[in-house]
Structure formats: structure tokens, C-alpha cells
Image (cartoon, helix red, strand yellow):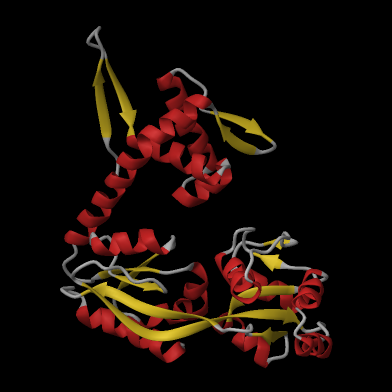
Amino acid sequence: MWIILYLYHKNNAIDMVNLEWYRTFKAIYEKGTLTAAADALFISQPGVSLHLSSLESYVGAKLFDRVSKRMVPTERGKVLYNALIEPLRALEDIEEQFQRSTEKNTPTIGIGMCFETFQYILERHLHKFDFNIVTKFSDYKELLQKLETGIIDVVITPQKSNTKGVEHIPFSKETIVLVGSSDINEKEFKDILKKKNPTELINWLMSNKWYGTSNDSEHFKRFWQTNFNKSPNFRQNYIVPNLNSIIRSLSIGTGLAIVPDFLCKDEAEKGLVKILWKGHKKLVNQLYFAYRKNTIYQKETEQILEIFRSEM
């Protein structure tokens, strides 16, 4: 979608501002590099550079500094981003709603979930659907908001909203577990567990290498808090893009991680990783299939639900 904004100045001259410049600016700001922005926008890197230079020329100020191959926003860039972010998101939502409202033959179903769930379950079933699928990856709060406003149709979530008209069907549970690489001394770990000495157990855990997706990983913090009544006071050694990356890394490396059990089930059965511990008290998430009760895509929604029911 291309939108041209015509701005009238005091001298009655007309300047044209292309909305794509702002979209490109937003992508650079959020992704941090020109390459990542180009990938997100499905345009070339020279195109990204052209949009940015055009916008900088228009506003008359530098919007980014190049620091160690990253694009770091200037103070003027930060101000522009804060002014643009909400209007741009609103326009993107309008655009998506308009596209969906013009569909006549093949429905398009928007599905929100975490990236790992898509890779583990839905990815290999896409070819079975006779309708279009658009996937969205974000935090659960934002996905549920998009469901409520009609931007997407289905959300796979461990959280429930209290919104009237949104149905939450429980379809599976996930247990958060301690998983280790195949070379971890499981007998040694079990012997320490039997001693019921929290300090010795924590020391053993901290003596190993740890994998995570971020230093404030929700699973990691909740598991530690549930079992030791305090937050972890050490950093994970290897921060990787997503939970599936953790499992693949452990399959060929050495170390520990905290992950949902369903993500490592296949690798555990093959002996590539070990599920070492479910904790003193199991940390279990109920998973919900959330959708709007008055959806016109009831048949398509039920097809998707059956996939998740059969896989988890």
C-alpha cells in the first residue's frame, strides 16, 4: 500500500512524503540494521538506504548513527519514532482489515502464537489447508488484543483474556522442565537431588553451561523462582534466537536449559537430549485455543484446532 501525503508550506510549495519512508524508518529503528530492515520489508537494502536518505533530507536532520555495523537512532530519530509508532500501527491494522474485507473466494485466517509453536506444530501442516494462513509472532497480550479487534482470528496462548465474545478452549498443557545435553552426568544429578540440599543443587546447576533466549527468559525465571524461591543470580552463557535453537544446540553441544517439555520430546526420545528434572513442584501451563465466538470462519477455525489437538 502506498500513501502519498501532501504538505502545504507557507510559500504554497508542495512536498511529497511517501508513507513507505516512515515504514522503512520504523523497520530500521526496530531491527537495528539496514539488512534486517530490508528482510522484514521484503525490499532491497539499497531501497532501504534510499528511503532513509529521502526521509532524512525531508526532515533536515540525521536520524541514525552507524555504530559497529548497527543503526543507532539519534535524539531526533527517537523523537520521530515516538511520534510515528502508534499512527503507523493503526494504519497497518486498517490496511490488514481492508484486505481481509475484500476477500470473496479464498478466506485468509490470521493465527497468533509463539515462533516455537509454529515451527514445532503448524509449519509442516500448512500445505493441508485450502485457505490462506497469515502467522503473527508477538507477546500474548498484543496477540489477544489483535484477536479482540479482528486483526487476527486465532491465538494459541497460555493466557486468557476477559473479553466478551472471545472463546478460550483448553486443548493441551506444557510442563516447563530442566533439559540437558546427552553428555550430562544424570546419575550425579539424581544423587544430588536425593540429598535435598538446595545449596548443593544450585551449585551443581551453576557449574554447567546454560542456554537461553534472553537473560530475562520467563520460563527460566519462573522455574527458578518456583523451585528455589528466588530469582536466578547468574547469567546464561549462550543466548540464541529461540527455544528451538536451544534444543538444536544442546543436541550437538553440552549444557542445560529450561524449556517446555513438548519442544524437546522428540530429541529426548532419540537420546539427543535428556529431560533431567520437572522440579520439586511442576510448573505447568494450560494452553488455550482462543477465537471470536461470532467468527465467520468457524469451519476453518475448527480445522486448525484439530491440528493442535492431534499434535499436543
Q: Residue at x 44, y 29 (%)?
A: 79
Q: Which residue occupies the foreground of this view, 41 or 31?
A: 31
**Residue 59 at what x, y percent from top left?**
41, 21
Q: Is residue 243 left or right of residue 15?
A: right
**Residue 300 at what x, y percent from top left?**
26, 79
Q: Which residue is drawn at 66% across and 85% down?
A: 267
Name the image quarter holding the N terminus. Answer: top left
Circle count: 0
**Residue 67 at what x, y percent from top left?**
66, 33
Residue 9 in sight in this render: yes
Q: In which quarter of the image is residue 73?
A: top right
Residue 254 in sight in this render: no
Q: Which residue occupies the foreground of this view, 108 or 173?
A: 173
- In the image, residue 144 above or below residue 5: below
Q: Quadrant of residue 213?
A: bottom right
Q: Is residue 87 left or right of residue 254?
A: left
- In the image, residue 193 above or below residue 57: below
Most extreme residue toward the top is: 11
